[in-house]
Structures are given as structure tokens and as C-alpha cells.
Amino acid sequence: MNKNLFFSVLCLSSIMVSSCGKYAPPIPPEVLAPKAVYDIEAMAYERGVVLKWKGNTNDKRSKELKTMNGYYVERACLQDDDLLNASIDSNVSTKLDYKVLSIVNDNQVSIREKLREDAKNRGESSRRVKVPSEKLKFNYVDSTIKYNDLCYYKITPFNQGNVRGDESSPIKVKFKGQDSFIIITSKNSSKHQKVTFDN
């Protein structure tokens, strides 16, 4: 073996060895958590409040969710009635002591994978198979709220390992049955509602 060939083989071996064992850095679980819910609605009826929303299919990277468990529906109620006339803002809503009212399950990932498997079995492309929109609609009824309560709600998605995603904007409710006053906020605006709900 001549010297040039020897050194070429030696350099190639060094490159291969130095490349072995290198892995991409792990992705933090928080990055894989779901984006916030959207199209939030809130309605009041005589005995409670109905919350409705649509689940997001993407994680915080804007990539398709790999896992999805459900949503924490949380509520914090205030005693000071004077706060009714105060505008809702992050300084108020983020300092409240939220309690989890319920967990609403979301099995969109298993539905999506089943639909894709069915498409493959039919000999069809599965890459563009999405979860039907009706499977991404969720709701929760809070029947424990009391008359004249002033409460804030938020909805937070979570996935494997109970890793929380982006929480929703707060929903402010002054409960007076069908005459309740509701404010749903977004980053750029607040939507004021005086709504009724017919059984």
C-alpha cells in the first residue's frame, strides 16, 4: 500500500469514527406540547356555564402532534364584586388561584392513526389524512358555579407525561343565570357577551 492510499484510508476511518455516536440533541417535552385551543365559546343557562372549543392538531413547533391526552378545564372565582367593572387583563387572570374542574379527554392522535391505517389497507395515500373537524370539538358544562359568582376560566391542553401546552385566553363570567355577563379575550381584543342558553 503506497503512502497516499494509506493516508486516504486513515483519514476516511478517522471521519467515520468521529461521526459515530453523535445524535441530535433531545427535544424538550414542552416543545412537543399542544398549541392553544381556539374558537372558544361560552354560554350561560339557569344552572351553569357551557364552554366550547376546538382542539389544535399541532405542537408548539407547528408540527403534527405525536401524542395528545386532553384538556384541563380550570376556574378561579373572586369574591370582590367591584371587579365586575374592571377590564379583564393578564395581571388579574394570571394571579388567580385556578383549580382544575375537570379533564376532558382528546383521542385525536389515535383517531388519526386509525384513519391512516385504514387508508393504507385500501391502497390509498395516508399522508393527507386528517382528523375530522367534528372530532376536534369539545365542551364542558360547569354546573357548580353559584349565582352572582365572578369567575375566570381557562382551558389548557396537555399530552404525554401531563406536559401542559399553551393555555387559552381567560374567560370572565359574572354568573346571573341566563342574564350572565361574559367576556372572552384574545391577544388583540375582548369580546363581550350577554348570552342565553336554551335547554
Image (tube, helix red, strand yellow):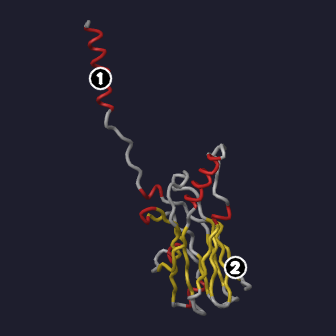
Using the rendered view, name the quadrant where residue 198 is placed.
Answer: bottom right
Q: Residue furthest right?
A: 198
First in sequence: mark 2 vs mark 1: 1
CA gap, disc 2 and disc 1: 70 Å
Q: Secondary structure at mark 2?
A: strand
Image point 55% across, 78% down: which residue?
A: 153
Amino acid type, mark 1: Ser
Residue denoted by label 1: 13
Mark 2 neighbour class, 10 Å CA radius: few under 14, some 14 to 19, many 20 or more: some
**x and y, in percent, of residue 68 in the image:** 51, 61
Image point 56% across, 74% down: which residue?
A: 170
**x and y, in percent, of residue 77 in the image:** 52, 85
Amino acid type, mark 2: Gln
Of residues 147 and 89, the one nearer the viewer is 147
Task: Report the mark closest to the observer, 2 or 1.
Answer: 1
Q: Which mark is residue 72?
A: none
Q: Residue furthest bottom?
A: 147
Mark 1 neighbour class, 10 Å CA radius: few under 14, some 14 to 19, many 20 or more: few
Residue denoted by label 2: 193
Q: Secondary structure at mark 1?
A: helix
Of residues 115 and 33, the one nearer the viewer is 115
